[in-house]
C-alpha cells in the first residue's frame, strides 16, 4: 500500500493526501455519528485531471474508491466500512463556479461547490437555483446529484434530477465523460447523465455539472398555520394548488413532537403560534409578480380554510425577516433531532392522497410495538414524509439489541408505505442503512437491471462497494 500512497501523493501533493488518523476523523464518520469506518487515506484533488489520475492508480492497485462530497448523507452512503481498504476521494477543493449564463438560464459548476454558494451565485446573477435543504451550508452539488436530493422546493421545481442539464464524470475505467451540455432538448440516444444521478457514487465520480436556473422570485408570501388534522392539511394543499397553481412553492408539514424538539434543542427558536396545536404547516407562495397580489391570494385562501373549519390558527410572515425565521425553524429539525435522542428517520414517500392513511397506520404500527414516540416532519406537497420513531437516549441504551430494534422499526414503517404504494427511500439515498430494504422490497428484475448496469460501468466492483446495490 505504501507504493499506492506514494503514487497518490505525487498526483495531489503532500498536503492534499491525508493519512494520519486525526486528519481522517471528519471523513470516516457520518454527520449523525452512527457509523465510523476506516480508510487508507483521503485524497483532495484540485481538478478533473487529478481525479482521473487518482482513479486510474486505485483501480490499477485493485483498491476501492469512495467518492465523497460534504459528508452529510443520512444513510451512511459517504463513509467507509470498518475494513479500511478504500481511498476516499473528497471533492471539497473543486468548488469553482465556472460560468453563469443568464440567457441560457444555466450555470456550470465544479462538483465540490457547496449548495448554498450555488444558490447565492444564482441570486447575484438575477436567477434562482431551487434545490434547498437543511444541510445546504455544507453539502456539495456532486453529493446532491449523486443522491438526487429533494428538499423543500420539490413541489414546484422537482428533485435535483430535474435541475441538472449536463454532467462531467470520471468513469471507473479512468476515462472522462464530458457531458456538460446546456440543452433543454437532446434526443441523441440514452440520456446518460441520468445514470449518475442517484447512483450514490457507485458508477463513477461526478466532477462538474451544468445546472438549470429559474427566474428569481421577487415576491414571497408565507404562513405558519395549524391545520386541524392531516386530512385537513391535505384539503388545504388542494385549495392552495387551485388558488395559486405554480406559485405554491412549499407545503411543509410537522407534528407537535417535532416542533417541541426544535424549540427545546435549537437555540434562538420561538413558537410561531401562541397556542399549542397537534399539526403545523409552513406554506410559501412565490413569484415574479408584485407582493400585494401574492399576499392577497394567501390571505384569501387562509380565510376560506378558516371558514371551512380546516385551520385552527395561522400566522402570516409580515416581512422577509419573519419569513427567514420560519424557514430557519423548518431547516433546524435535523439538528434538533440529533441532539434530542435517537430518531430512526424513515425517508418514506407515498402518493400524496395516501399521506393521512400512512401517518395514521404507521403511528399505530410503531406505538403498539415499540417504546418510541412518533415525530413527523415532511414535504406534504410531494408525499415525502419523514416518519421518525423517536427513542430517548436512556431507552435506546437499555435495548438488548439496538440494531435489531432499528431494523424492526424500519420494516414496520416501510411495510405500511409499501401497502400504500409508496417507497422506503424518497430523497436521502439508500447508502448502507437501507440495503436490507432494497433486498426485501425491490423486485429481482429491478435488482438484476441495476446489477447489470453496475457491472458494465464498474466490472471490478470498486466504486463505493457495499452501498445502494445489494
Ligand atoms: C441537517 C440535514 C438536513 C438534510 N435535509 C435533506 C433534505 O431535506 N433532502 C435531502 O434530499 N437530503 C437531506 N439531507 C441529506 C444530505 O444532505 C443529502 O443527501 C445531500 O445531497 C448529500 O450531499 P453531500 O455533498 O453531503 O454528499 P455526501 O454525504 O458526501 O455523499 C452522499 C452520497 O453521494 C456520493 N457522492 C458524493 N459526492 C459525489 C461525487 N462528486 N460523485 C459521485 N458520487 C458522489 C457519496 O459516495 C455518497 O454515496 C440532509 C442532511 C442533513 C445533515
Image: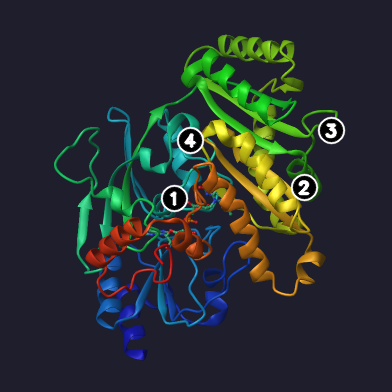
Q: Classify residue 204 by image quadrant.
A: bottom left
Q: In which quarter of the image is residue 462?
A: bottom left
Say which of 125 and 28 sits in front.
28
* Above or below: residue 202 compared with residue 103: below
Task: Choose between 83 and 291: the one closer to the eye.
Answer: 83
Image x and y of residue 433, in percent: 53, 63
Task: Point out the tag, 4 or 3, that comes first from the N-terminus.
Answer: 4
2 and 4 marks in contact (CB < 8 Å)? no
Which disc is residue 273 wearing?
Answer: none
Compared with 266, 11 (above or below) is below
Label 1: how many Cα within 10 Å (few below 14, some 14–19, many 20+)? many
**Residue behind mark 2:** 261
At mark 2, the secondary structure is helix
Residue 175 image offset from top left, x and y in percent: 19, 64
Question: Mark 1 vs ligand 1: CB under 8 Å?
Answer: yes
Q: Is mark 3 on a helix, strand or loop?
A: loop
Amino acid at each position: 500500500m505504501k507504493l499506492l500512497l506514494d503514487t497518490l501523493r505525487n498526483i495531489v501533493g503532500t498536503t492534499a493526501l491525508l493519512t494520519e488518523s486525526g486528519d481522517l476523523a471528519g471523513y470516516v464518520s457520518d454527520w449523525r455519528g452512527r457509523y465510523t469506518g476506516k480508510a487508507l487515506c483521503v485524497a483532495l484533488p484540485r481538478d478533473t485531471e487529478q481525479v482521473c489520475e487518482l482513479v486510474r492508480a486505485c483501480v490499477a492497485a485493485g483498491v476501492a474508491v469512495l467518492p465523497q462530497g460534504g459528508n452529510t448523507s443520512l444513510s451512511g452512503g459517504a463513509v467507509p466500512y470498518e475494513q479500511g481498504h478504500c481511498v476516499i476521494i473528497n471533492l471539497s477543493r473543486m468548488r469553482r463556479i465556472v460560468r453563469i449564463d443568464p440567457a441560457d438560464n444555466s450555470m456550470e459548476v465544479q462538483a465540490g461547490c457547496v449548495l448554498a454558494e450555488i444558490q447565492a451565485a444564482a441570486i447575484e446573477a438575477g436567477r434562482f437555483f431551487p434545490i434547498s435543504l437543511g444541510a445546504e451550508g455544507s453539502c456539495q452539488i456532486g453529493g446532491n446529484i449523486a443522491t438526487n436530493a429533494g428538499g423543500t422546493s420539490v413541489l414546484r421545481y422537482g428533485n435535483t434530477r430535474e435541475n441538472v442539464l449536463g454532467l462531467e464524470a470520471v468513469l471507473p475505467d479512468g476515462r472522462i465523460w464530458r457531458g456538460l451540455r446546456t440543452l433543454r432538448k437532446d434526443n441523441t440516444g440514452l440520456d446518460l447523465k441520468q445514470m449518475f444521478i442517484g447512483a450514490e457514487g457507485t458508477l463513477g465520480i461526478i466532477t462538474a455539472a451544468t445546472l438549470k436556473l429559474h427566474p428569481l422570485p421577487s415576491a414571497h408570501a408565507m404562513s405558519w398555520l395549524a391545520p386541524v388534522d392531516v386530512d385537513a392539511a391535505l384539503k388545504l394543499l388542494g385549495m392552495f394548488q387551485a388558488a395559486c397553481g405554480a406559485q405554491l412553492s412549499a407545503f411543509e408539514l410537522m407534528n407537535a413532537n417535532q416542533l417541541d424538539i426544535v424549540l427545546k434543542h435549537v437555540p434562538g427558536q420561538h413558537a410561531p403560534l401562541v397556542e399549542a396545536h397537534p399539526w403545523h404547516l409552513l406554506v410559501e407562495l412565490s413569484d415574479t409578480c408584485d407582493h400585494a397580489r401574492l399576499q392577497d391570494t394567501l390571505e384569501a385562501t387562509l380565510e376560506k380554510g378558516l371558514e371551512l373549519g380546516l385551520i385552527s390558527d395561522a400566522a402570516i410572515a409580515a416581512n422577509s425577516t419573519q419569513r427567514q425565521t420560519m424557514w430557519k425553524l423548518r431547516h433546524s429539525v435535523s439538528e434538533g433531532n440529533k441532539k434530542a435522542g435517537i430518531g430512526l428517520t424513515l425517508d418514506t414517500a407515498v402518493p400524496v392522497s395516501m399521506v393521512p392513511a400512512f401517518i395514521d397506520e404507521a403511528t399505530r404500527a410503531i406505538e403498539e410495538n415499540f417504546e418510541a414516540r412518533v415525530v413527523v416532519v415532511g414535504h406534504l406537497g410531494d408525499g415525502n414524509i419523514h416518519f421518525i420513531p423517536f427513542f430517548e437516549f436512556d431507552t435506546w441504551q437499555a435495548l438488548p439489541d439496538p440494531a435489531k430494534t432499528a431494523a424492526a422499526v424500519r420494516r414496520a414503517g416501510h411495510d405500511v408505505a409499501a401497502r400504500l404504494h409508496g417507497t422506503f427511500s424518497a430523497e436521502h439515498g439508500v447508502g448502507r442503512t437501507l440495503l436490507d430494504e432494497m433486498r426485501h422490497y425491490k423486485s429481482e428484475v429491478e435488482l438484476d437491471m441495476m446489477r447489470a448496469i453496475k457491472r458494465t460501468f464498474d466490472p471490478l466492483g470498486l466504486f463505493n462497494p457495499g452501498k445502494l446495490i445489494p
